[in-house]
Image (cartoon, rainbow, N blue to C red):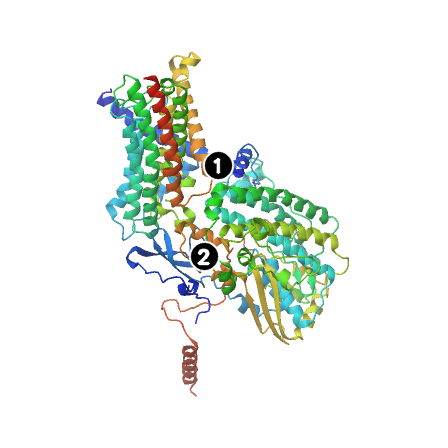
Amino acid sequence: MFEMAKELFKQLFKKPFTNMFPAKHAPKSTVGFLKKVEEGKAKLNEPVPIPEGFRGKIAYDKEKCIGCKLCIKVCPANAFEYLEKERKVKYHLSRCTFCAQCVDVCPVNALVSTKEFLLSDYNKK
Amino acid sequence: MNPDKVIEKKDRERKPDEPVKKKRKSNSYSLSIGPIHPALKEPIRFDLQIEGEKVVKVDFELSQVHRGIEWIGTRRNPVQILYLAERICGICNICHSTCFCIAVENIANIEVPARAHYLRTIHAELERIHSHILWAGVAAHELGFDSVMHYTWKIREKVLDVMEALTGNRITKGIMMIGGVRRDINEKQVPMVKEALEYYKKGFGKLESIFLKDPVIKSRTVGTGILSRHDGLALCAVGPTARASGIKKDVRQDEPYAAYSDLDVKAITPKDFLGEVKGDVFDRIVVRLLEVKQSIEIIEECLKQMPKGKILHEEKIPKLLAELRNIEGDGIGRLEAPRGEVIHYVKMVGKEAPYSWKVRAPTYNNLLPWGPMLMGEQVADVPIIAASTDPCMSCTNRAVVADGNSEKILDNEAMRRLSVEKTNALKRRLGR
Amino acid sequence: MIDALQAIVLIPIIAIVGIFIALLFKGIDRILAARMQARIGPPLSQPFIDVKKLFMKENIVPKNAVKWIFGMMPVVALTASIAVLFYIPLFGFKPLLDGYGDAILVIYLFAIPSLAMVLGGFASSSRYATIGAQREMVTMLSYEFPLAISIIAIAWLVSSTTACSPAFSLGAISIWALVGPLGILGLILLFLVMLFVMPGEVGAIPFDSPEAETEIGGGVLTEYSGRNLGLFYISASVKTIAFAAFIVALFFPGNISNTLFLTGIGAILADALFFLVKIFIIVFIGSTFIRVAIARFRITQVVKVYWGYASFMALFGLLLIAIDLMGVV
């Protein structure tokens, strides 16, 4: 009976489970907070570690690309645009769903999954 | 007709010998819950007639979140649809993509390697653990017991971590591929999965004592929202909702897919644990918790039995796509999602994109049972009863009445007349 | 007895200090609740931030509402909550209006914020608020009964054993010394009843069916917004500490300074701190812990719990005290 009450009382004296990323309480301005971190005035709590084989932001090596259009064919979100003149593709990060099907299909490994996942930005790249 | 508009028929639920109750209209008033309401995780509108605190009439209105996923699907090739299918439901994403795979594999007569079958089973069962634990938290929240919600969601993190390590993502895993799976489980990952299973075995005992022995949860759920076996069968309930009413119905048992034919999976009813079947909310909690335990056992068995070998029927995606472009015919995929039976119907006509793709999510079947469940209950129990079937509205919505301002619903005849009118108007405009 | 000038000076001070302490306790309450749920929780200043934001927001009055009742009720609720503070000993001092009112008056004052919420709920003409108001009324009727039994038992005990006039002033007498062992058992029962009434009185979770967020989306407060909601928010916080202070005054009056041989400013500080600690313990047990450890009751269960178990316990406590007194007298 009242198993939860016991558990709650125990948890009262334990460290919270929450990972305090990026700070304990939401900073008033995230940009301002990051600036402070860069200046060394504040400390950034580390995010939860990501495992091997994580499907993060996709890195596109334009040099390697041969313009075979396979990525365009398999991409479920139309994140690739074919550039007629250059015979290469353009990768739209904002449309990407990070399924990494294009990484699997690319014959020359021009597309690679990275571990990068902090992708929000003010700049529309 | 709007197929999703379901009107609760009170007369059907009444047993033949029960006298017709006289309605006292003066005391009842209507209460509209939803489309947006703190108790509802997804939009649906309940129109309840209330007498004091008692529900005397139930009606609900669907079609608040139509997304046109099937329509999008008919403009994409099967490999692209896999990722679209995943997004039908965030929680049963493996189920929908696997189900689509099975349907397409049926059409193309693709044989899936044995190891891939086992991997699919493991992923599906991990997802079941995740879904049921998440549901337990939501149910606790509906009961006003947020501590349990935070506790269960804390426990849930482990399975998310495992899924992230195995597939590369926490929720939309993108692991399924037509003819197999995309990633194998390597030797390094096996101990991690086993450790997580041990963690859940331990956590299961705690969850059991919290949910099944807490006096307040018990007093709120026992005898609440009863769905009789008769009603469950008549209204085609599926999944844990049906099993909690004592209907031994489980696709894994009745029509095994993936590796389930090698494993001894039996539909769980509350009879196994409580000795009797009431079909109330408490029974549905029991069934889901026992299924978590069952899933742990299934995964352990899979890890033991899993053969070595290929995990994909065709590794080269362009070749696979070329193969799928030439197939013709229709196929059906059935599988047991955490919420019940999912059915995908796909028709291919020798083109890149399927001619038709139809999804029937389990929630669709579990909506009608709300009628008999909610009837005669208190307003306070509406959220927990509604949540007890683990509804997923956006998975269910596939039709929408777009004529928002008027009440009228177009039937077949009216549609034909309108299209004739439009054709005539076009003809006139083109001067023919 | 105090003179009018003193009262005019002290009333705003007590009100402001009371609100400050109430919001501070609310912050502590939220952090502790979060810690028990393995969360971090908001910063300590969160209730102040909430109130500040609510006061800046637009105050929306529904079209069909009875506007004057709708707008007046938050003020009435807050006024009554603060008024309670004048009749309860705070920080080791005597009550401000000592001698003008007694425990019975305090029960009536405690009922006013709930009544204000009921009226406000009915006046807001929302279905959810109407259901909430009905529930609030039922809840109030349920917990008032065991509460009244407990208070009257204590009042009767005090008036029949001491030379105090029937309108005894709170905090002057330690009731534990007035009874024998059987009476002490009875008092412990009454204390438990009071603790059990507390979550109902302050609208904390097992008994928060009038507000029940997941059922009727805020209930009585559904249509309230902006300044009005802010006033109700403060009123609820003040009521929490007022009720805790009331329990402290009834069961654990007395100061610590005499025991510690402190004098002057040190004694005042020590007493004030001791008072805060006592209140904190009561709030933690009676509101914070119960709120996170139990699921919400249905309204029918609320009635059953209060009229059944709590009233029975209170009556039994009363009986024990009576037997004890009969033996003594």
Residue C39 lies left or right of residue B179; in this view the side is left
> Quick check: do tags 2 and 1 share a chain?
no
Q: Which residue is mark 2?
A: B373
Q: Quadrant of residue B60?
A: bottom left
Residue B219 is situated, as x and y percent measured from the top left of the image, at 46, 45
Chain bearing tag 2 is B
Any mark on residue C33, and which? 1
Residue ranking furthest to the front: B17
User: Which sits in the foreground, C329 or B120?
Assistant: C329
Residue B334 is situated, as x and y percent measured from the top left of the image, at 61, 65
Any mark on residue B298, and which? none
Specify the quadrant that holds the C terminus of chain A.
Answer: bottom right
* Residue A58 appears in the figure: no
Element under label 2? Answer: helix
Residue ranking furthest to the left: C4
User: Which sits in the foreground, C91 or A62?
Assistant: C91
Element under label 1? Answer: helix
* Residue B209 appears in the figure: yes
Residue type highlighted by circle 2? Met
- Category of crowding for the residue at label 2, using alpha-carbon neighbours closer than 10 angstroms: few (below 14), some (14–19), many (at least 20): many
Q: Residue at x 66, y 70 (%)?
A: B106
Chain bearing tag 1 is C
Residue ranking furthest to the right: B308
Residue type highlighted by circle 1? Ala
Q: Quadrant of residue C257?
A: top left
Residue B271 is situated, as x and y percent measured from the top left of the image, at 57, 52
User: How far is mark 2 from mark 1, CA to CA?
Assistant: 34 Å
Above or below: residue B214 compared with residue B392:
above
User: Which sits in the foreground, C33 or C210?
Assistant: C210
Residue C180 lies left or right of residue B102; in this view the side is left
